[in-house]
Structures are given as C-alpha cells and as structure tokens.
Amino acid sequence: MNLGDCRLLYVLACIGLALIIVSPTLAMFVRLPGSESFSELWILGPGHMAEGYPFNVGANEAYKIYLGVGNHMGGSEYYVVYVKLRNQTGSLPDNVNETPSSLPPLFEYRFFVRDQETGERQVLFSFGDVSFDGNTSRVQTLTLNGLSINVNESAAWDQTNSDFYYQLFFELWLYNAALSGFQYHNRFVGIRLNMTIPFQNPK
Amino acid sequence: MLKRNYALACMLALTLVFALRLNVCFAFDQSQAQAAVANADGGLASAYVAVVEAEQVGGNVTQLVASLQVAGGLLDDAHDAYRLGDYDAAYSSASNCSSDAFGIASQAANLKVQAEQARSNALFFTVALSSVVLSVFFVLSLLGWRYLKNRYEKRVLGLRPELR
C-alpha cells in the first residue's frame, strides 16, 4: 500500500467518523421516511375475544360487543366511528371506490388515539318493538348504550341462509385537518344478525 | 342593623331562587342546540389541531389526548341527544364540550411554545457540541495524519540498503 492509498483510506475513515459525530444534529433536520401508515378497526365478542359474537338476536335482550380502533398513522389521530344498521338490500361501504354507506348514522363514537396506541369502547345494544308479519320482520327501535333510536328497519326472510338478515356495522372516519372535516377511512366492520321469533309455549 | 342584614339576606336568597328557577325553566330550541353542537364540533377539531401541532414540535401530549377523549365523549352525548330531540341536553353537553375544547386548545398552544423553546435549546446545544467535537476531531485527524505519514516515511526509509 503506497502513501496515496493510505491517505485515501484515512480520509474516508475521518469522513465516516465525522458523520457519526454530526449524526445527532442531522437527525434534528432530516426526517427519514417512516413505515406504512394505517389504522385498524375491530369488534370483539362479549368475552373480549374474537368469538361469541351475537348472531341469533331477539327483542328486548341486551348484547355486548367491544369496538376498537388502532392508530399506526405516525401521529395522534381523531377518528369517528359511525354505527349503521342495514338489511339485505341496505347500502354497504364500497372498498374499491372508498365510499361509505349511504345509510344515515345512528350513533357515533369519537376516538382520539396516539400513534401506536389503541382505543376501545363497549357497545351494548338491544332491539325493541320487533314484529313479524309472514316473511318479513320489522325492528322499530335500536337501543345503543342506553339510547333508544327509531330505526324502523325491515328484513325479508332469506331463503338461502334461513334468517332475517340484519347487519350492525361500524364505519371508520378520519379527521383531515387540511379539509377541516372527516373523511371516510375505507374501513368498516360489522356483525351479521338473525332476528328470531320469541318462543311461545303452546298451551 | 340586624334588620338590615336580615333584609339583605332575604333579597339574596330570593335572587338565588329566582336565578335557579330561571335556569331550570330555560329551554333551548332546535336551532340553538344545532348551533351549539356545530360550535362544539369546530372547537374540538381546532383543539385537536392545536394538540397535533404541539406534538409535531416534540411536546408530550399524553394528557391532552386524554382530555380530548373526555371532550369527545361530551360531543358524542350532544350528537346523540340532538338526534333524540333532547335539545336541552344537546345544548348542555355541547357547551361543556366547547368549554373543555377551548381549555385544551389553550394548553396545547402553551405546550407548543414550551416545546419549541426546548427544541430550539436542544438544537443549539447539539449543534454547538457537534461543532466543538468536530473541530477537535479535525485537528486530531491532521495531527494523526502527520504522525502516520512520518511513521510511513521512516519505515520506507528504513528499507533502503546502506553502504558500509
């Protein structure tokens, strides 16, 4: 190794060490791209597990599920989860076009979640004024966390699945400071419900 | 003197009763409740933006996010009450939410100023320390190079054949 090679090696080593020395300062100015940002939305059953979700539901019986939101967006976020109820033909959110369901929200949950943290709420619901007329069932009221809402939703008997199909679903919306409003965040979860006729003891 | 005090106390008591009664009887209509809810919506969003700004400059916003969650619960209550047509409850919850949001925004603004100051101090300290260390390193590297160069030359000179 000649003197020129030694000098080159020495200069490179010095530059490397100098970069290490100034790295704390550089870190204050240079922001490296973070990992992929996304949000989570989930529902858990009454046992706080992904099982035991209510399916066969009846009038005036209370059911419990847990609704959770996870934030991996890189900063604190402001979410609103809209609760909606639909039958077989009711509008669902469109994942491809990223549009929400056109149904009106019945209830809403606000979540302020810091990055890498989660928020969770207990959802207690029951149905009231349920009536059956031939192949049609009708739900007049939905009580969510103690608040009764007039839903007036009906469902026809589903021959394929043998149920009166209803779906309670939750849409995730995210606050966009640039637009000063909420935007649908293209995430929704729901539970399928079968409205059952109460058993009447024949005498 | 005693009579005068008694009369004053009676007047105070009557005023208090009247004020309380007024408060109880006072009802809000739909437009007032709607305006209060919209105001609370905007106030909470502004408070959230202020908290995010404080967070972006390095402020610890754990407590403020928890406060936002509480205020958000009030706004949920206001929206639910409004949907159910309970405009008094909607107005009350929305007003409480607005008040909380205003406090949060104010705290966030203070935190942002403090965080910016702390960040500026930290930046100055880091830049100053890096500059000093870099200067010392530069001088040492020059001295090191001189030492290495001398050593190299001595070694090369030591390889020359000597005549006797």
Image (cartoon, grey):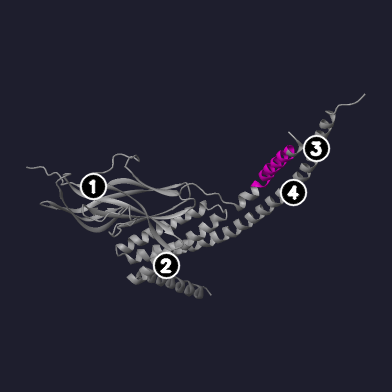
| Mark 3 residue type | Lys
Callout 3–callout 2 Cβ contact below 8 Å = no
Q: Secondary structure at mark 2?
A: helix
Residue B50 spot, x, y in % from top left: 51, 60
Co-location on one chain, circles 1 and 3: no
Residue at the location (76% across, 45% down)? B138
Q: Residues within 10 Å of mark 1 (few under 14, many from 20)?
A: some
Quadrant that contains the C terminus of chain B: top right
Q: Secondary structure at mark 4?
A: helix
**Mark toward the viewer: 3 or 2:** 3
| Mark 4 residue type | Val
Residue wearing tag 4: B132
In primary-sequence order, the first of circles 3 and 2 is 2
Residue wearing tag 2: B39
Is residue B65 placed above or below B13 in the rendered structure? above
Residue wearing tag 1: A193
Which numbered disc covers residue B149? Answer: 3
The kind of secondary structure the magenta stretch mainly shows is helix
In primary-sequence order, the first of circles 3 and 4 is 4
Is residue B68 placed above or below A58 in the rendered structure? below
Residue A37 spot, x, y in % from top left: 45, 49
